[in-house]
Image (spheres, rainbow, N blue to C red):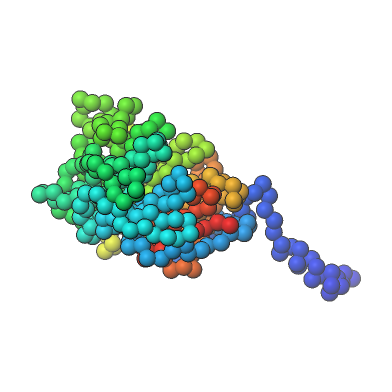
Amino acid sequence: MKLRIPAFLFAFILLTSSCHSSTNNESDTIPNSSVETKKPNTNYKPAFTGQTRVHAVKTQSHYNVKVVCEGLRSPWGITSLPDGRFLVTEKGGTMRMVTPDGKISPAITGIPSVNSSGQGGLLGLTLDPDFSHNRMVYWVFSERQDDGNLTAVAKGRLSDDEKTIENAQVIYRATPAFKSSLHYGGRILFDSKGYIIFSTGERSDLASRPQAQFLNSSLGKIIRITKDGKPAPGNPFKPGGDARPELYSYGHRNVQGLALNPATGDLWETEFGPRGGDELNLVHPGKNYGWPTITYGIEYSGPKIGEGIQQKNGMEQPVYYWDPVISPSGITFYSGNEIPEWKNNLFVTALSGQHIDRLVIKNNKVTGEERLASDQSQRFRDITQGKDGALYAITDQGKLYKIGK
Protein backbone atom coordinates (compact mmCIF):
# COMPACT_ATOMS: atom_id res chain seq x y z
CA MET A 1 0.00 0.00 0.00
CA LYS A 2 1.51 3.35 -1.06
CA LEU A 3 1.22 6.36 1.20
CA ARG A 4 -0.22 9.30 -0.71
CA ILE A 5 0.80 12.78 0.44
CA PRO A 6 -1.75 15.55 -0.22
CA ALA A 7 -0.58 18.05 -2.80
CA PHE A 8 -0.64 21.01 -0.41
CA LEU A 9 1.44 19.13 2.16
CA PHE A 10 3.96 17.99 -0.50
CA ALA A 11 4.38 21.60 -1.64
CA PHE A 12 4.91 22.74 1.96
CA ILE A 13 7.63 20.11 2.46
CA LEU A 14 9.44 21.22 -0.70
CA LEU A 15 9.23 24.88 0.31
CA THR A 16 10.57 24.39 3.81
CA SER A 17 13.36 22.09 2.67
CA SER A 18 14.59 24.73 0.21
CA CYS A 19 14.71 27.50 2.80
CA HIS A 20 18.01 28.17 4.53
CA SER A 21 19.08 30.07 7.58
CA SER A 22 22.37 31.41 8.83
CA THR A 23 23.48 30.54 12.33
CA ASN A 24 26.09 32.32 14.43
CA ASN A 25 26.20 35.11 11.83
CA GLU A 26 27.99 32.84 9.36
CA SER A 27 27.32 32.58 5.64
CA ASP A 28 25.66 29.48 4.28
CA THR A 29 27.97 27.00 2.60
CA ILE A 30 26.87 25.75 -0.80
CA PRO A 31 27.54 21.97 -0.68
CA ASN A 32 29.86 20.37 -3.24
CA SER A 33 30.47 23.62 -5.07
CA SER A 34 33.24 26.10 -5.79
CA VAL A 35 33.02 29.64 -7.11
CA GLU A 36 35.49 28.58 -9.82
CA THR A 37 33.92 26.61 -12.67
CA LYS A 38 36.68 26.89 -15.28
CA LYS A 39 39.24 24.14 -15.83
CA PRO A 40 42.66 24.66 -14.20
CA ASN A 41 45.69 25.27 -16.40
CA THR A 42 47.57 22.31 -14.92
CA ASN A 43 47.00 18.90 -13.39
CA TYR A 44 49.02 19.89 -10.32
CA LYS A 45 47.61 18.57 -7.07
CA PRO A 46 47.18 20.73 -3.97
CA ALA A 47 49.36 19.95 -0.98
CA PHE A 48 46.35 19.68 1.34
CA THR A 49 42.57 19.72 1.27
CA GLY A 50 41.18 23.24 0.99
CA GLN A 51 44.26 24.76 -0.61
CA THR A 52 42.25 25.62 -3.74
CA ARG A 53 38.64 25.57 -4.97
CA VAL A 54 37.17 25.52 -1.48
CA HIS A 55 33.39 25.41 -0.91
CA ALA A 56 31.41 28.44 -2.04
CA VAL A 57 29.59 30.55 0.54
CA LYS A 58 26.91 33.17 0.11
CA THR A 59 26.36 36.26 2.23
CA GLN A 60 22.96 36.10 3.90
CA SER A 61 22.87 39.69 5.18
CA HIS A 62 21.60 42.42 2.89
CA TYR A 63 24.27 44.64 1.37
CA ASN A 64 24.59 47.05 -1.55
CA VAL A 65 27.24 47.55 -4.21
CA LYS A 66 27.16 51.23 -5.15
CA VAL A 67 29.30 53.44 -7.38
CA VAL A 68 30.37 56.42 -5.26
CA CYS A 69 32.14 58.28 -8.06
CA GLU A 70 33.74 57.99 -11.46
CA GLY A 71 36.51 60.06 -12.98
CA LEU A 72 39.57 58.91 -11.08
CA ARG A 73 42.53 58.30 -13.40
CA SER A 74 43.79 54.72 -13.04
CA PRO A 75 43.65 54.74 -9.23
CA TRP A 76 46.07 52.30 -7.59
CA GLY A 77 45.94 52.71 -3.81
CA ILE A 78 43.34 53.90 -1.33
CA THR A 79 43.43 54.56 2.40
CA SER A 80 40.93 56.00 4.87
CA LEU A 81 41.57 59.35 6.52
CA PRO A 82 40.59 59.96 10.16
CA ASP A 83 37.68 62.21 9.12
CA GLY A 84 36.10 59.59 6.84
CA ARG A 85 37.49 60.84 3.53
CA PHE A 86 39.89 58.84 1.37
CA LEU A 87 43.35 59.50 0.01
CA VAL A 88 43.88 57.87 -3.39
CA THR A 89 46.96 57.43 -5.56
CA GLU A 90 46.66 57.53 -9.34
CA LYS A 91 49.08 55.50 -11.45
CA GLY A 92 50.26 58.52 -13.44
CA GLY A 93 51.74 60.18 -10.36
CA THR A 94 49.02 62.14 -8.55
CA MET A 95 47.16 61.85 -5.27
CA ARG A 96 43.59 63.00 -4.70
CA MET A 97 41.14 63.32 -1.85
CA VAL A 98 37.73 61.73 -2.28
CA THR A 99 34.79 62.32 0.04
CA PRO A 100 32.38 59.51 0.99
CA ASP A 101 29.77 61.14 -1.23
CA GLY A 102 32.10 61.09 -4.24
CA LYS A 103 33.65 64.57 -4.54
CA ILE A 104 37.15 64.37 -6.05
CA SER A 105 39.77 66.98 -5.17
CA PRO A 106 42.26 68.55 -7.58
CA ALA A 107 45.59 66.75 -7.88
CA ILE A 108 47.86 67.07 -4.84
CA THR A 109 51.27 68.42 -5.87
CA GLY A 110 54.77 67.92 -4.49
CA ILE A 111 55.14 64.23 -5.30
CA PRO A 112 58.45 63.07 -6.85
CA SER A 113 58.28 62.04 -10.50
CA VAL A 114 57.24 58.46 -11.19
CA ASN A 115 57.92 56.17 -14.13
CA SER A 116 54.39 55.18 -15.07
CA SER A 117 55.23 52.98 -18.06
CA GLY A 118 54.05 49.38 -17.98
CA GLN A 119 53.00 48.35 -14.49
CA GLY A 120 54.83 51.23 -12.89
CA GLY A 121 53.56 54.47 -11.43
CA LEU A 122 52.43 55.87 -8.11
CA LEU A 123 51.45 52.71 -6.24
CA GLY A 124 50.36 51.89 -2.69
CA LEU A 125 50.12 54.34 0.20
CA THR A 126 49.55 54.41 3.94
CA LEU A 127 49.22 56.97 6.70
CA ASP A 128 51.52 57.42 9.66
CA PRO A 129 49.92 55.87 12.79
CA ASP A 130 50.13 59.40 14.26
CA PHE A 131 48.75 61.07 11.13
CA SER A 132 46.20 63.12 13.10
CA HIS A 133 49.12 65.02 14.64
CA ASN A 134 51.96 64.84 12.10
CA ARG A 135 50.03 64.50 8.79
CA MET A 136 52.72 62.19 7.35
CA VAL A 137 51.99 60.02 4.29
CA TYR A 138 54.12 57.13 3.00
CA TRP A 139 53.90 55.68 -0.50
CA VAL A 140 55.54 53.32 -2.98
CA PHE A 141 56.39 54.25 -6.57
CA SER A 142 58.45 53.13 -9.55
CA GLU A 143 61.51 55.27 -10.12
CA ARG A 144 63.70 55.54 -13.19
CA GLN A 145 67.45 55.15 -12.67
CA ASP A 146 70.33 55.30 -15.15
CA ASP A 147 70.65 51.50 -15.08
CA GLY A 148 66.94 50.68 -15.10
CA ASN A 149 63.84 51.04 -12.93
CA LEU A 150 63.21 50.16 -9.30
CA THR A 151 60.64 50.19 -6.53
CA ALA A 152 61.06 53.10 -4.11
CA VAL A 153 59.42 54.23 -0.86
CA ALA A 154 58.90 57.92 -0.06
CA LYS A 155 57.34 60.02 2.67
CA GLY A 156 56.06 63.57 3.01
CA ARG A 157 53.69 65.77 4.97
CA LEU A 158 50.22 66.56 3.67
CA SER A 159 49.98 70.33 3.90
CA ASP A 160 47.37 71.96 6.10
CA ASP A 161 45.48 73.19 3.02
CA GLU A 162 45.69 69.66 1.55
CA LYS A 163 47.00 70.93 -1.77
CA THR A 164 50.54 69.57 -1.65
CA ILE A 165 52.92 67.05 -0.10
CA GLU A 166 55.62 68.96 1.77
CA ASN A 167 59.28 67.93 2.05
CA ALA A 168 58.85 64.70 0.11
CA GLN A 169 61.89 62.44 0.32
CA VAL A 170 62.77 58.92 -0.82
CA ILE A 171 63.67 56.74 2.17
CA TYR A 172 64.34 53.38 0.47
CA ARG A 173 65.22 52.05 -2.98
CA ALA A 174 64.87 48.34 -3.80
CA THR A 175 68.01 47.41 -5.70
CA PRO A 176 69.24 46.23 -8.08
CA ALA A 177 67.45 48.23 -10.75
CA PHE A 178 66.33 46.40 -13.91
CA LYS A 179 65.35 47.50 -17.38
CA SER A 180 61.85 46.15 -16.90
CA SER A 181 58.51 47.93 -16.42
CA LEU A 182 56.83 44.95 -14.73
CA HIS A 183 56.39 43.47 -11.24
CA TYR A 184 57.10 46.33 -8.84
CA GLY A 185 55.02 44.98 -5.95
CA GLY A 186 53.98 48.21 -4.28
CA ARG A 187 51.75 47.71 -1.22
CA ILE A 188 52.67 49.31 2.08
CA LEU A 189 51.41 49.36 5.67
CA PHE A 190 52.50 49.96 9.25
CA ASP A 191 52.78 47.07 11.68
CA SER A 192 51.69 47.17 15.32
CA LYS A 193 55.15 48.37 16.40
CA GLY A 194 55.13 51.36 14.09
CA TYR A 195 57.46 49.96 11.43
CA ILE A 196 56.85 50.02 7.68
CA ILE A 197 56.21 46.81 5.77
CA PHE A 198 56.12 46.94 1.97
CA SER A 199 56.40 44.60 -1.00
CA THR A 200 58.58 44.38 -4.08
CA GLY A 201 58.31 42.26 -7.22
CA GLU A 202 61.06 40.26 -8.94
CA ARG A 203 60.66 42.40 -12.07
CA SER A 204 59.29 39.50 -14.19
CA ASP A 205 62.15 38.87 -16.62
CA LEU A 206 63.74 35.41 -16.74
CA ALA A 207 67.04 37.10 -15.90
CA SER A 208 65.65 38.80 -12.78
CA ARG A 209 63.45 35.97 -11.46
CA PRO A 210 66.24 34.32 -9.43
CA GLN A 211 66.59 37.59 -7.48
CA ALA A 212 63.55 36.50 -5.46
CA GLN A 213 65.76 33.79 -3.90
CA PHE A 214 68.83 36.02 -3.41
CA LEU A 215 69.12 37.37 0.13
CA ASN A 216 71.51 40.10 -1.05
CA SER A 217 68.76 41.54 -3.28
CA SER A 218 65.62 43.57 -2.49
CA LEU A 219 63.61 42.03 -5.35
CA GLY A 220 60.77 39.57 -4.80
CA LYS A 221 60.65 40.40 -1.10
CA ILE A 222 58.59 41.71 1.76
CA ILE A 223 60.70 44.36 3.50
CA ARG A 224 60.42 45.89 6.98
CA ILE A 225 62.01 49.27 7.72
CA THR A 226 61.83 52.25 10.06
CA LYS A 227 60.27 55.58 9.09
CA ASP A 228 63.76 56.68 8.05
CA GLY A 229 64.28 53.69 5.75
CA LYS A 230 66.63 51.72 8.00
CA PRO A 231 66.25 47.99 8.78
CA ALA A 232 63.62 47.60 11.49
CA PRO A 233 64.63 46.11 14.85
CA GLY A 234 63.56 42.49 15.25
CA ASN A 235 63.95 41.55 11.60
CA PRO A 236 64.96 37.91 10.97
CA PHE A 237 68.27 38.69 9.22
CA LYS A 238 70.91 40.44 11.30
CA PRO A 239 73.30 43.16 10.11
CA GLY A 240 76.72 41.99 9.01
CA GLY A 241 75.59 38.75 7.39
CA ASP A 242 75.09 37.77 3.77
CA ALA A 243 71.39 38.71 3.87
CA ARG A 244 70.11 42.27 3.77
CA PRO A 245 68.87 43.10 7.28
CA GLU A 246 65.76 44.91 6.00
CA LEU A 247 64.35 41.71 4.49
CA TYR A 248 61.35 40.15 6.22
CA SER A 249 60.46 37.28 3.84
CA TYR A 250 61.55 36.19 0.37
CA GLY A 251 60.76 34.01 -2.61
CA HIS A 252 57.87 36.18 -3.80
CA ARG A 253 56.83 36.86 -7.39
CA ASN A 254 54.79 40.08 -7.30
CA VAL A 255 53.00 40.95 -4.05
CA GLN A 256 50.24 43.54 -4.48
CA GLY A 257 48.21 42.65 -1.40
CA LEU A 258 49.27 43.19 2.24
CA ALA A 259 47.03 43.17 5.31
CA LEU A 260 47.19 42.52 9.05
CA ASN A 261 44.55 40.26 10.55
CA PRO A 262 42.88 42.44 13.22
CA ALA A 263 42.04 39.36 15.33
CA THR A 264 45.54 37.87 15.44
CA GLY A 265 47.96 40.54 14.21
CA ASP A 266 49.28 38.11 11.57
CA LEU A 267 50.58 39.46 8.26
CA TRP A 268 48.93 38.12 5.10
CA GLU A 269 49.76 38.74 1.46
CA THR A 270 48.47 37.96 -2.02
CA GLU A 271 50.72 37.67 -5.04
CA PHE A 272 50.32 37.10 -8.73
CA GLY A 273 51.17 33.72 -10.18
CA PRO A 274 52.02 33.32 -13.86
CA ARG A 275 49.43 31.24 -15.79
CA GLY A 276 47.74 29.77 -12.74
CA GLY A 277 49.11 29.80 -9.23
CA ASP A 278 47.97 33.12 -7.73
CA GLU A 279 48.74 32.80 -4.02
CA LEU A 280 47.48 33.75 -0.58
CA ASN A 281 50.23 33.45 2.04
CA LEU A 282 50.50 33.82 5.79
CA VAL A 283 53.83 35.60 6.15
CA HIS A 284 56.34 34.45 8.74
CA PRO A 285 59.61 36.33 9.25
CA GLY A 286 62.60 34.81 7.52
CA LYS A 287 60.61 32.26 5.53
CA ASN A 288 61.07 31.40 1.85
CA TYR A 289 57.86 31.39 -0.23
CA GLY A 290 59.37 29.48 -3.10
CA TRP A 291 59.24 31.52 -6.29
CA PRO A 292 60.49 30.59 -8.87
CA THR A 293 61.56 27.17 -7.55
CA ILE A 294 58.04 25.99 -6.64
CA THR A 295 54.77 27.22 -8.09
CA TYR A 296 51.28 26.04 -8.96
CA GLY A 297 51.43 27.92 -12.26
CA ILE A 298 53.08 27.51 -15.64
CA GLU A 299 54.64 29.88 -18.17
CA TYR A 300 52.18 32.02 -20.13
CA SER A 301 53.30 30.13 -23.24
CA GLY A 302 52.54 26.77 -21.62
CA PRO A 303 55.80 25.10 -20.47
CA LYS A 304 56.53 24.21 -16.87
CA ILE A 305 58.47 26.67 -14.76
CA GLY A 306 61.84 25.32 -13.71
CA GLU A 307 61.51 21.70 -12.63
CA GLY A 308 57.73 21.98 -12.54
CA ILE A 309 57.55 21.17 -8.83
CA GLN A 310 55.08 22.50 -6.26
CA GLN A 311 56.69 21.45 -2.99
CA LYS A 312 60.21 21.54 -1.60
CA ASN A 313 61.69 21.29 1.88
CA GLY A 314 62.44 24.69 3.34
CA MET A 315 59.84 26.46 1.22
CA GLU A 316 56.42 27.56 2.42
CA GLN A 317 53.15 26.41 0.90
CA PRO A 318 50.48 29.01 0.07
CA VAL A 319 47.48 28.87 2.38
CA TYR A 320 45.37 29.12 -0.79
CA TYR A 321 45.92 29.38 -4.53
CA TRP A 322 43.85 30.13 -7.61
CA ASP A 323 44.04 28.38 -10.98
CA PRO A 324 42.92 29.94 -13.31
CA VAL A 325 44.18 33.21 -11.90
CA ILE A 326 42.03 36.05 -10.59
CA SER A 327 45.00 38.49 -10.45
CA PRO A 328 44.74 39.45 -6.76
CA SER A 329 45.68 43.04 -5.97
CA GLY A 330 44.81 44.98 -2.81
CA ILE A 331 43.40 43.17 0.23
CA THR A 332 41.83 44.04 3.58
CA PHE A 333 40.34 42.24 6.55
CA TYR A 334 36.84 43.32 7.52
CA SER A 335 36.55 44.48 11.12
CA GLY A 336 33.26 46.37 10.92
CA ASN A 337 29.87 45.59 12.40
CA GLU A 338 27.61 46.39 9.42
CA ILE A 339 27.74 42.82 8.09
CA PRO A 340 28.46 40.60 11.14
CA GLU A 341 29.06 37.46 9.07
CA TRP A 342 31.97 39.22 7.32
CA LYS A 343 33.84 39.75 10.59
CA ASN A 344 37.56 38.98 10.11
CA ASN A 345 36.97 37.75 6.54
CA LEU A 346 39.60 38.71 3.97
CA PHE A 347 38.52 40.70 0.92
CA VAL A 348 40.68 40.49 -2.20
CA THR A 349 40.38 42.77 -5.23
CA ALA A 350 40.63 40.80 -8.48
CA LEU A 351 41.86 42.42 -11.68
CA SER A 352 41.45 39.82 -14.43
CA GLY A 353 38.79 38.12 -12.29
CA GLN A 354 36.79 41.38 -12.24
CA HIS A 355 35.26 40.84 -8.81
CA ILE A 356 35.95 41.19 -5.11
CA ASP A 357 36.86 37.84 -3.59
CA ARG A 358 35.65 37.14 -0.05
CA LEU A 359 37.56 34.49 1.88
CA VAL A 360 36.38 32.99 5.15
CA ILE A 361 39.48 32.05 7.17
CA LYS A 362 39.44 29.83 10.26
CA ASN A 363 42.55 28.56 12.05
CA ASN A 364 44.62 30.00 9.20
CA LYS A 365 42.81 27.91 6.59
CA VAL A 366 40.37 29.12 3.94
CA THR A 367 36.99 27.50 4.59
CA GLY A 368 34.76 29.43 2.19
CA GLU A 369 34.91 31.71 -0.86
CA GLU A 370 32.46 34.14 -2.44
CA ARG A 371 32.69 36.49 -5.41
CA LEU A 372 31.13 39.93 -4.95
CA ALA A 373 30.42 42.63 -7.55
CA SER A 374 31.15 40.24 -10.42
CA ASP A 375 28.36 41.85 -12.46
CA GLN A 376 30.18 45.21 -12.58
CA SER A 377 32.81 44.24 -15.21
CA GLN A 378 35.52 46.17 -13.36
CA ARG A 379 39.18 45.49 -12.69
CA PHE A 380 39.19 45.95 -8.91
CA ARG A 381 42.58 47.29 -7.82
CA ASP A 382 42.49 48.08 -4.09
CA ILE A 383 40.13 48.02 -1.12
CA THR A 384 39.90 49.61 2.32
CA GLN A 385 37.42 49.79 5.14
CA GLY A 386 35.82 53.19 5.64
CA LYS A 387 35.24 54.87 8.98
CA ASP A 388 31.53 54.12 8.49
CA GLY A 389 32.21 50.36 8.54
CA ALA A 390 31.61 49.79 4.83
CA LEU A 391 34.19 48.57 2.31
CA TYR A 392 35.42 50.92 -0.42
CA ALA A 393 37.14 49.66 -3.58
CA ILE A 394 38.76 51.40 -6.52
CA THR A 395 38.97 50.08 -10.07
CA ASP A 396 41.38 50.53 -12.97
CA GLN A 397 38.52 52.11 -14.88
CA GLY A 398 38.42 55.01 -12.40
CA LYS A 399 35.49 54.15 -10.17
CA LEU A 400 35.13 54.13 -6.40
CA TYR A 401 32.66 51.58 -5.05
CA LYS A 402 30.99 51.28 -1.66
CA ILE A 403 30.12 47.74 -0.54
CA GLY A 404 27.91 47.65 2.55
CA LYS A 405 24.54 48.70 3.86
The x and y percentages for residue 280 are: 41, 48
Comparing 227 with 209, the one in front is 227
Comparing 382 with 7, the one in front is 382
Point 33% across, 40% down: residue: 136
Point 20% across, 30% down: residue: 242
Point 61% across, 53% down: residue: 27
Query: In this picture, is 355 found above or below 308?
Result: below
Give the quarter of the figure containing the C terminus.
bottom right
Q: Is residue 120 left or right of residue 190?
A: left
Comparing 101 with 393, the one in front is 101
Q: Residue furthest left?
A: 146
Q: Residue furthest right?
A: 1
Comparing 161 with 26, the one in front is 161
The x and y percentages for residue 322 are: 42, 55
Q: Which quadrant holds residue 159?
A: top left
Q: Is residue 270 left or right of residue 157?
A: right
Query: In this picture, is 245 found above or below 47?
Result: above
The x and y percentages for residue 26 are: 62, 50
